[in-house]
Image (cartoon, coloured by chain):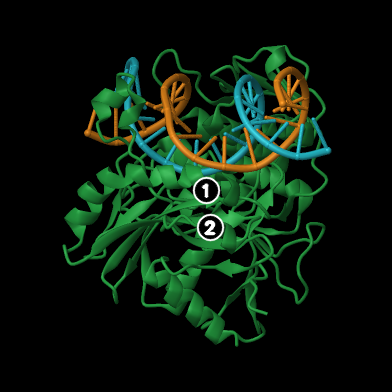
Chain colours: A green, B orange, C cyan
Amino acid sequence: NNRFTFEYDVIGITCNNVPKIKIRIISGNSSFVDYLVYFQEKLPKPEEEPLYAIEVTKTTDGESRNTGVYQRGTKFVFLDRYYPNTKKIMLYDNQIEDNKEPTDTNIFGNKMLTTNNVSILGKELKMEHYSKFKDLDDLIRHKNSMRRPPKGNVPLLIKKEKDLIKVSGRLFKSGSLAHDPNIGALSLIMSSIRKFDNKSKIIITQHGLKQNHLTSRNKFIAICNLLNVEIEGLQVPKYNWPKKYWHYEEKGEKLGTIFIHIVVENFTKGYSIFDNHAGSEKGYFVTSAGDMIPLQKYTNRDKYKSGDKDYAMRIPDLILIDPNQNEIINIEGKTFDNRFAGINELKDYDFIEKEYIKKHYSSKYKIIRSVVLYGKGNGTDITETEIGFLLTNDGKLEIWVWSPSLFKEAIKNLKDFWR
DNA sequence: CAAGAAAGGAACACGGGGAC
DNA sequence: GTCCCCGTGTTCCTTTCTTG
């Protein structure tokens, strides 16, 4: 009936025992990995246990030691509470060159991941750089023999006294319990300790927190509840676990841009040269030569840093190229209700067009801008030619005479394919 | 300069409270 | 009740600080 069912079929891959691969967009109710893989015929429910849970990062050791390896740790510990048998995977999706030799921080982090039965993919590592810790002493020795941070920083250190294990680490950041790298690092350290020792008391010291920073919905509090860990001098509140680990995504502007992205790449000669579907995901711009270059964040860094936020570089959610029509399309995704804000944001793309698109693509390409919508609305409501596509919440695909030809071609071919 | 740690920041989801 | 503002929380980086 020409409606989208919010399910993507993967075509072109065949595999014994796997007749069909389907993709759905879901969201987590708290700390949540990027992908879940189910192997079954029926549509998965949150109560059912997935085969794989995959977390992806693009941050390299060279860019940031602690963020690169610790920050995602909490997710795996959190996942274990819901799906203890799911295979956990950390995928390094490095699109730029990483360090030749991993730092100690990186090795320590990798070893904690594998100690927690997380498989590491996408990184070429020597065995000794990711093998599991042998025992608690091995873990403690490794961390405590690492170089100390500069004065004023709290080193991550583990001290074992009889039936008590003290772990130091700062958790306070900008007014709350929000120190991401250390939330991840301490989750992994505590969970690793628990693999070897289920009896000793674990206390976190030098955290910098006050009682009012401990709230019952904080993910770190969740981990403390789960692993029976104390925060020195404070009372750890009881965590309210969400009943379900995830739910099907039904709102959110990204549904529209993801849809057009996938349909264009699969049903036309067009393809993406930049995408930023998830808010803070790191994105790369693809040049005509096929190189991936990271985008700058400011049009004028000094002015931005001295307080003028107008110098942040505005980036579209998606940039598509149409080799047939020689068009490059800058796309802003919005919900139907926010469509006018989307039209407004189109005005902000002068900088990226001048500094990136025009520099890296020949002048034969005409650059156009378009808003892609998702949500509750009707195609007949739209009279603004800035809007190029609408995916409605009940799966209707709406285009208009003024829509970019790439969109028209994509939708036509999609409909013909499923006819 | 490299490494360990901390801080700065953008984007978005969500829930509460007030306005209508 | 519905709509919208606003603060809180989460995620994912990006950059900075300091010293061996």
Q: Left or right of A58: which side holds A45?
A: right
Asked if residue A153 lies left or right of residue A41, the reply is left
Q: Which residue is mark 1?
A: A339
Q: Is residue A58 shown above or below A15?
A: above
Residue to which mark 2 is pinned: A382
Q: Give the amino acid at mark 1.
A: Arg
Mark whose residue sits in front, 1 or 2: 2
Which chain is disc 2 placed on?
A: A
Rendered position, A301 above or below A332 = above
Question: Which amino acid type is shown beneath numbered disc 2?
Answer: Ile
Q: Would residue A280 be visible to someone looking at this image?
A: no
Q: Residue at x 34, y 42 (%)?
A: A348
Specify which label sits upstream in the sequence, 1 or 2: 1
**What residue appears at the point 64 percent right and 44 percent down from the top-left corner?**
A75
Answer few, some or many: residues within 10 Å of disc 1's Cα (few below 14, many 20 plus, some between 14 and 19): many
Q: The disc numbered 1 marks a residue on which chain?
A: A
What residue sits 17% from the left and 54% below the top? A359
Q: Badge 2: few (under 14), some or many (20 or more) residues near its Cα, within 10 Å? A: some
- Tell me if A242 is positioned left or right of A18 in this view: right
Q: Are marks 1 and 2 in contact (CB under 8 Å)?
A: yes
Depth check: give the residue in front, A151 or A347: A347
Q: Position of residue A49 (x, y in %)?
A: 77, 61
Disc 1 on helix, strand or loop?
helix
In percent of width and height, residue A98 lies at 33, 50
